[in-house]
Image: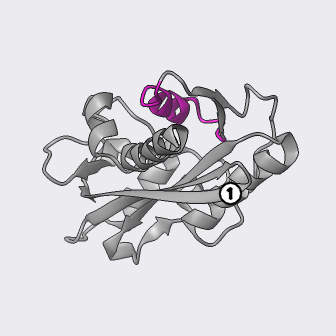
Amino acid sequence: MKLVFATHNENKFAEVKVLMPSHIQLVSLTDIGCTEDIPETGSTLKANAQIKADYVTEKFNLSCFADDTGLLVNALNDAPGVYSARYAGEQKSAEDNMNKLLMALKGQSDRKARFSTVIALNLNDERYSFEGTVEGEIVHQKKGAGGFGYDPIFRPDGYDKTFAELPLETKNKIGHRGKAILLLIRFLENSKSR
């Protein structure tokens, strides 16, 4: 089965590809010749994921899934949320985003946060969605060289390391995207056996 993951983010694609069963041929937007940056104009993570999946299905007529992820910080009324990728501006710089967030939390004792990923799947003219979340907190300074996005400043509950310090295998098992992808894979496995 060929399935498009509607992303240009190579890090995210690599993270998801290792989780996919071998019978699913995962391809990216680049692989199908889609060079456009699909606008995320939704007001929720689910809406943004669906917009991206619909774009690929309508334009390329392919089965597709897309995700949108938000970092929701308690002390900031769940910001940056749906604007996580462009929190510090349209340049979508992870460094700028982390610096802005650390500044916004300066002097805050409540550093609780959660990552949430919503996946929208378009398959056989039907739409499905899956969600994964992970609770944690924002640390005071960047730690670790792995991962991407906000990983160097997010420490998941029950761990003393940030996502950027944890092995990818661990991050995929406990993380928001990994949990959502697992639900997607289970669904695909069940629909295959029907």
Which of the two residues, 92 or 178, is positioned nearer the viewer here?
Answer: 178
Left or right of 62, for residue 46: left
Residue reaching furthest to the top: 22
Direction front: furthest residue: 194
Image point (67%, 53%), residue name: 90
Quadrant for the N terminus in the image? top right
Q: Position of residue 83 (x, y in %)?
A: 57, 63
In this rendering, would 59 be left or right of 131? right
- Is residue 123 something one can see in this rendering? yes
Find residue 37 and report its image quarter: top right
Asked if residue 126 lies in the magenta stretch, the reply is: no
Q: Can you give x and y, in whole percent of width and height, for residue 164 in the image?
A: 32, 36
Quarter of the rendering containing residue 6:
top right
At 76% from the left and 50% from the top, the residue drawn is 38
Q: Quadrant of residue 148?
A: top left
Residue 163 makes an appearance in the image: no
In this figure, which residue is indicated by the disc labeled 1?
A: 126
Q: What residue type is labelled 1?
A: Glu
Q: Label 1: how many residues lie within 10 Å, few (<14), some (14-19) or many (20+)?
A: few
Q: Which of 99 and 127 is in front in this view?
A: 127
| x and y, in percent, of residue 131 in the image | 44, 58
Instruction: Say which residue appears at 25% left-offset and 42% top-offset.
Output: 162
The magenta region covers 6-21
| Residue 29 coordinates in the image, percent (x, y) | 72, 34
Reply above or below: 70 against 179. below
**Secondary structure under the numbered disc 1 in the rendered image:** strand
Q: Would you place residue 136 above or below residue 92 in this image?
A: below
Nearest the viewer among 122 and 102 is 122
Horizontal side, residue 141 vs residue 59: left or right: left
Colouring of the image: one colour
